[in-house]
Amino acid sequence: ENWQPPCGAARARRSPLPGPAMLVALVLAGLRGGLAGGEYVLEDSFVSDQFFSEWDFISADDPTHGTVDYVDRQEAEATGLVRATADRVYMGVDMEAVLPPDRGRRAVRVQSRTAYNEGLFVLQAEHLPTGCGTWPAFWMFGEDPSHPWPMWGEIDIIEGVHTDTRVMTTLHTGKNCRQDAVGLGGVGPAVEWGSGTRGNPSVDCYVEAPDQWPNQGCSQRGPESTMGAPFNAAGGGTYAAEWDPRAGHIRVWFWSRGSEPEDLVARRPDPESWGPSYAYFRIDSGTCDPSHFQQLKLVFDTTFCGDMGEPMFAASCPDQVGQGLSCEDLVRLHPEEMTEAYWSISGLDVYIMQFPAPPVREPSPSPWLNFLMVLCFLGAFAGVAALYALVWIKVTKDSGDSNRITAFYDQYRHLLTGAVGNLPSVPWSRLIPAPLANNSWSRLARDEKESKSTEDEGSMGGLIPPPTGSAHRLGSGLSGPPIPKSSHGLGRSASPPKHQAPVPGGWHALGGGPPTRSNSGPPSRSNDLA
């Protein structure tokens, strides 16, 4: 009996200029939009001839104690309470029956099968239910057996009673969700709050908040002609409700028919370009934690009288009260009063914020792997350098200055061939310099002409020193370094070069093969060339 209609709501203090907190919020919003780079992408578009296949009909008793009898889909379709086409959805109430005292008027409550944890919800309506006794709502709520209402919260996007012409948008939560700063300290746009039991702004969203009506929540009023007869006479309008836990807000806009933003009409919505919303709520750890709202489903319903409509009936419908009618009497006995109690919806779209996929980064190698790679490279370089040095030292020792380059080339080729001779499966031949017949400096070019005579000499028994200036043929067919002449005269028998000795680990251990032997016995050695 103490209920006061929200039309007498307390107005938040308005300031001609935004306060410091508002400026900070705007800057942060701009930075967030620029850095995040997210955009709303269409997730669900409900209006079609299959609309009711994606919604559940709730035929249980009305939890708000309305004078209503919710029916299932089969009965609703059979009695014409609902119908859907490709571009329109109609949901109405029984407009014919006169009811006994123990019955409610037939209507529908439909609930989406999809639950959401964020999103932009855009409703285009041509007609909303209105009239004395009615209480329509388009809202969202979440609950399951482990989380009874209001643990997962409720967002009433469109709500009004009787002949209201201004929409109410409300949050209902558990404890610790307050909106004191909104519109009072420069946070968010200026809003108009509903009134509590003492005329105080209803800024506490808790359903049992002190100094507020039972289950009042934190409610804000929309502008004129957002509901009721003026809304319907204008051909309807569009609502957009943004629930963005990342940005830390819930806000709602309204546009009359034909004045919607171009980006919204093109289905590329950019809420940051729409200007101030008529409803704004903060949801962050400091005011109202985002965890208050989870797994919310969309709901359309039309009930009558009930916990909200009954107390406000006298103020909203004085003519009916003057006829001695209560809210329930009007609903049961006068179906002609229900002809405007229907929804006509031309669009219901849900957008979800999506962000560009982050660039794929190849995993960076471990610092230890880099170190090992460098170490292996240095080791390989040092090994090659050492090999060249050893070959150069041997060539310098066994050759004259004039033949040093040629001998170095031949010795290197011999050494490399011997090292890889036991690995036939690898194309090592590509790594070994081939004889260059046209290069006059290469001893190999000359050796090709003398190879036959050299092989004949190898069959004459023992190791016969090659003629001066000719190449000594190794077992692998490669040219070894020349044998220097003796400084004591001609005709002396010379021992094979030291690199031909069949000593394990010596040069022939790398694959050059043992020296050529004659059939008569071991090679001869000179005493002074041991």
Image (tube, rainbow, N blue to C red):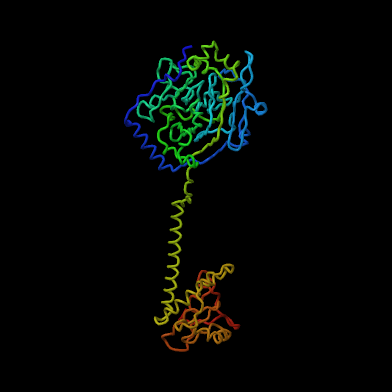
Q: Which residue corresponds to the image point at 56% horizontal and 28% vertical from the top-left?
A: 343
Which residue occupies the foreground of this view, 245 or 235?
A: 235
Which residue occupies the foreground of this view, 286 or 121?
A: 121
Residue 206 point in image, percent of width and height? 47, 21
Q: Is 53 on the left or on the right of 369, as rendered?
A: right
Where on the picture, by quarter, is residue 223?
top left
Figure disc tally: 0
Residue 502 point in image, percent of width and height? 53, 74
Which residue occupies the foreground of this view, 294 or 21?
A: 21
Q: Is 184 on the left or on the right of 122, as rendered?
A: left
Q: Which residue corresponds to the image point at 45% horizontal and 16% vertical from the top-left?
A: 4
Which residue occupies the foreground of this view, 435 or 252?
A: 252
Residue 10 point in image, percent of width and height? 39, 20
Residue 227 point in image, percent of width and height? 49, 26
Q: Which residue corresponds to the image point at 47% horizontal and 22% vertical from the top-left?
A: 217
Residue extending farthest to the bottom is 490
